[in-house]
Amino acid sequence: MKICLCGLGRAGREFVRYLAENPVHELVAVLCREESATAGKPVTELTEIAIDPSLCVQPIERFDPKATSVDVIVDFSACATSLKLVDLCCRTKTNLVICPTDFHEREIEYIKNKAITNSIGLVFASTLTSGINLVIDFVERLSKVFPDYRFEIIERHPYNKPSPTKTARYIQQAISREVVPISSIRLDGYVGVHEITATDGYERISITHESFSRTAFVRGALLAAEFIQRKRGVFYMKDIVKTLLLDEKL
């Protein structure tokens, strides 16, 4: 699969590293905003990762996915850049995996409608790892099986991560209760931890998911890219997990 990456932040750099060390798929392009200082610079120079020295960062506005036969674009940028990518993908009929989480509901609806209207394949992958999606699926089922249980969520992330996380909100939404408290801990040393506790006062169930490395996010993004490569329509990571890991039909 020929992949185009947008965004060279921490997750984007880990994505480049992973593909360099595991060349099952080919990284054929890296994109940025028109005004980015990275435009035109070699990816290997920016990341200090041994990769094709001719691979340079290109502004979205000047990129043609057809020229490099891109199968899927993986987006690790931010909302404003993602919206430009959606325009590019709809115009060129290129499938897209969106990993950023900084969207408002109206922006998500806009992107969904545009993808459906233009008949492209798109994955909203804000909850990236397979593990956390399995946890969300289990918690949703647990909530239905034990309607008298009370739930609480604790999430732990680095000090500069906004709180609560979107992932904690998704877990909260999966639990069919009016009130599900979320506690946020912000300390260095964490990549991401979500702990869910449920009890009826007689017994207690605790579920913890922890990402030790951003490689977990990369593997989730690649799973999404493989899933959407030849599909049309809008999907979420939970759809991929149910289809590929739980063997359930959409």
Image (cartoon, grey):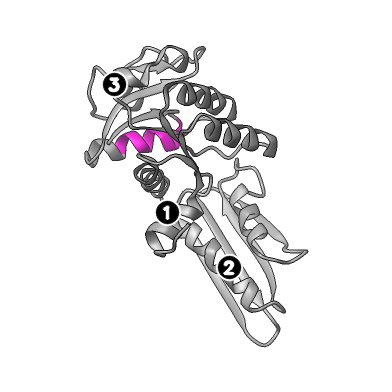
With 34 as the anchor, is 152 left or right in this view? Answer: right
Query: Does residue 177 appear anywhere in the picture?
Result: yes
Residue drawn at (41%, 45%) of the image: 224
Looking at the picture, how far across and down is residue 203, in whole percent?
63, 85
Q: Which residue is mark 3?
A: 68
Residue placed under numbered mark 2 in the picture: 139
Instruction: Please tell me the numbered disc located at residue 196.
Output: none
Provide the major secondary structure of the magenta segment: helix
Measuring 34% from the left and 27% from the top, which residue is drawn there?
A: 47
Instruction: Residue type at mark 3: give it.
Output: Thr
Mark 3 neighbour class, 10 Å CA radius: few under 14, some 14 to 19, many 20 or more: few
The one of 248 and 176 positioned closer to us in this rendering: 248
Tell me, yes or no, whether the highlighted magenta stretch contains residue 11: yes
Segment tinted magenta in the rendering: 9-17
Look at discs 1 and 3 and give the one toward the viewer: 3
**Quadrant of the image occupied by residue 43:** top left
